[in-house]
Amino acid sequence: EVQLVESGGGLVQAGGSLRLSCAAFGFTFDDYAIGWFRQAPGKEREGVACINPSDGSIYYADSMKGRFAISSDNAKNTVYLQMNSLKPSNTAVYLCAADKLALGCGLYEYEYWGQGTQVTVSV
């Protein structure tokens, strides 16, 4: 059974940093693309950053480039999202997702989803 477990969210002041983790279980890690997505209250879910652990290819949403960084630790079956210079507008539930066939960071490319972790950025 595919399972994704996010952690690392919390409350942080504007300008601060957080590192989110997505631990993957139940599938061959190298065979799946894994992405971070977010959903703010009243807004649609959107892609943040995605990575393919087999070849290291990475995609970022334009608005995340420069402040967010996605990485993977294949030995730990874990994908990380380092978020720096956080803004109140980054407040959202952050979810990770996995799919064997995803080529990028499109929302509907991903079949398996975690429960999400809340990130709240205060002014």
Image: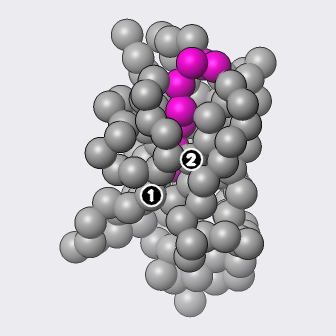
Q: Is residue 10 visible?
A: no
Marks 2 & 1, CB-CB < 8 Å contact: yes
Q: Secondary structure at mark 2?
A: strand
Give the number of callouts: 2
Give the residue drawn at x 58%, y 82%. 87
Residue 50: give its label: 2
Q: Is residue 3 visible?
A: yes
Question: Considering only vertical position in the picture, is 3 above or below 11?
Answer: above
* Residue 5, image x, y percentages: 49, 31
- The residue that label 1 is drawn on is 47
Left or right: 20 with respect to 82? Answer: left
**Residue 35 is covered by the magenta coloring:** yes
Give the residue drawn at x 26%, y 66%. 44
Residue 68: give its label: none
Q: Which residues are magenta?
A: 29-37
Q: CA distance from mark 2 to mark 1?
A: 8 Å
Q: Secondary structure at mark 1?
A: strand
**Residue 8 is covered by the magenta coloring:** no
